[in-house]
């Protein structure tokens, strides 16, 4: 998958959302922890290539 990248110093449209590669978040593995305020979530990549986010 190719992830669009912006060059430093360039502006992006106001409605552009950040894009994160799941394999970057898991550092090449299949599980990552994501913190949101006081909550900790687990992101898992399944064998079928789907994402599961659990609390």
Image (cartoon, rainbow, N blue to C red):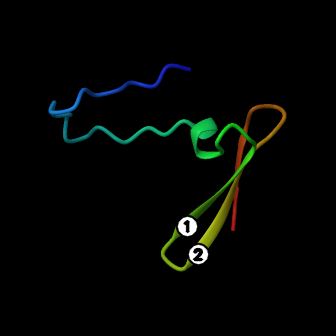
Q: Quadrant of residue 21?
A: top right
Q: Residues within 10 Å of mark 2 (few under 14, many from 20)?
A: few
In depth, the one of 42 and 27 nearer the eye is: 27
Q: Quadrant of residue 17?
A: top left
Q: With respect to residue 48, does 52 lie above or below?
A: below
Left or right relative to 13: residue 43 = right
Q: With respect to residue 53, does 18 lie above or below?
A: above
Q: Quadrant of residue 39?
A: bottom right
Residue placed at 54% from the left, 80% from the top? 38
Residue 44 placement (x, y as % from top left): 74, 49
Q: Secondary structure at mark 1?
A: strand
In the rendering, which numbered label is found on residue 39?
A: 2
Residue 18 placement (x, y as % from top left): 38, 42
**What is the quadrant of the C terminus in the image?**
bottom right
Residue 50 placement (x, y as % from top left): 73, 37
Left or right relative to 37: residue 8 = left
**What is the quadrant of the N terminus in the image?**
top right
Q: Residues within 10 Å of mark 1 (few under 14, many from 20)?
A: few
Residue placed at 59% from the left, 45% from the top? 25
Q: CA distance from mark 2 to mark 1?
A: 6 Å
Residue 53 placement (x, y as % from top left): 68, 55
Residue placed at 29% from the left, 37% from the top? 16
Tell me whether the residue at label 2 lies in contact with that at label 1, contact meaning CB atoms closer than 8 angstroms.
yes
Name the residue that disc number 1 marks. Answer: 35
Residue placed at 35% from the left, 26% from the top? 5
Q: With respect to residue 38, does 22 lie above or below?
A: above
């Amino acid at each position: 998958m190719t992830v669009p990248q912006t060059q430093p110093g360039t502006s992006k449209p106001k409605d552009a959302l950040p894009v994160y590669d799941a394999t970057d978040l898991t550092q090449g593995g299949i599980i990552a922890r994501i913190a949101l305020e006081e909550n900790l979530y687990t992101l898992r990549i399944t064998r079928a290539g789907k994402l599961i986010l659990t609390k």
